[in-house]
Image (cartoon, grey):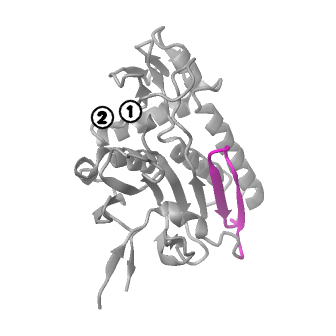
Amino acid sequence: MRYRLLLWTLVFGLWTLPLFASGKSSKTDSISKDVSAAVSVHPAAGAKSSPDAAIRKAFDEGRRLYKDLDASSSGEVAQINKTAGKGPTKVSAPMLMLLRVCQQISEWTQGLFDVVKTENNKEATLAVDFGRGEVALQDKKAWVDFNEIRTGYIVDRMAGTLKAQGFSDFMIQLKGASPPAAPPGKKGKINVASAAPMANAVVRTMGRDGNDYWRLNVANPDGSGKNLCRVSLEASSVATADVLGQRQPATDLRSVTVIARNATNATGLARTALIAGKSRAGSMLGAIGESGFGAILEDRNGKIQTIGDVTAACFEE
């Protein structure tokens, strides 16, 4: 009996799940013009609201966060950028928590992941005082850009909304990626690291889909409409970043899929590993010892490398 490991980036398969199966409420809608979402929730005894009402709340939270994390909006990110080089500014507890997560991703990626941007990719510092709840961009020409992890963070916060309503069996999927932010006050494309490919498919699951794991169909990318296999998830997050649509991608990888406990980590790590290239990505991801963590690297020739606890891989007999 021969088994061949098959990995196709989850961007092809995340949207083939039959969300409207019996016994659960589901909705597919847009978060923004660039990002769409699909949410499926099973009923729960003692929940604070109906599944449909909870899903609406989750979408409202997703749309609010998408705007708030946009550097061109009037939210916290814009305020941080506005005060660059002028001293500290107060931020919310969720923003401080997000910055802690970003700090962890930066450590895992040996500094390659960084939400602080400059036009010439020079180093700049964002000072964070967790005790006072203050942050300060010390370079007046630097700015903060969360686009590299925005979709993953939105998925995590949408999951938090569903859990707060008393639901423990659900799936959230986001597809799409927004363009990198230009420096405050400027328009057009810029030559910064954030212009590289981003994670464009993110999913988070919790609990089970009835009596079984949540299952995702992985479709053949040849456009035939056929499925190569299925993947099973329970309480995991999966993000895929790929170079599709890039004319001259500056990486020897075609795609990176990361499995992690939360979608923010999965998103940031997938995108960063993709631009890091096969050798560096293998080194930095291989050093992550988190429980349940796994990654799958696909190079430009289709060769697969698996790292850690890869529960989202599938096999063909």
| SS category of the residue bearing label 1 | loop
Please give the residue where the numbered disc 2 appears in the rendered image. Answer: 111
Q: Which mark is residue 114?
A: 1
Question: Is disc 1 surrounded by few (<14), some (14 to 19) or many (20+) residues within 10 Å?
Answer: many
Position of 229 compared to 286: left or right? Answer: right
Q: Residue at x 41, y 22 (%)?
A: 118
- Give coordinates of residue 100: x percent, y percent: 42, 34
**Image-quadrant location for residue 34:** top right
Q: Is residue 270 left or right of residue 158?
A: left
Q: Residue at x 42, y 44 (%)?
A: 268
The magenta region covers: 22-44
Amino acid type assigned to the residue bearing label 2 in the image: Gly
How far across and down, in percent of the image, does residue 314 sit? Answer: 40, 74
- Is 26 magenta? The answer is yes
- Residue 231: give its label: none
- Asked if marks 1 and 2 touch (Cβ < 8 Å), the reply is yes
Q: Residue furthest bottom?
A: 1
Q: Position of residue 199 (x, y in %)?
A: 47, 49
Determine the residue positioned at 49% across, 67% down.
234
* Residue 26 visible to an observer of this rendering: yes
Badge 2 density bin: few <14, some 14–19, many ≥20, Cα 10 Å: few
Res. 225 image quadrant: bottom right
> Which residue, as the protein is rendered here, is positioned at the far front?
247
The quadrant the C terminus occupies is bottom left
Q: Which sits in the foreground, 192 or 103?
A: 192
Rendered location of residue 254, percent (x, y): 37, 56
Amino acid type indicated by mark 1: Asp
Does 257 lie within the magenta span? no
Task: Give the position of the N terminus as an image quadrant.
Answer: bottom left
Give the Cα distance between marks 1 and 2: 7 Å
Most extreme residue toward the top, as rendered? 86
Answer with the quarter of the image where residue 142 lies: top left
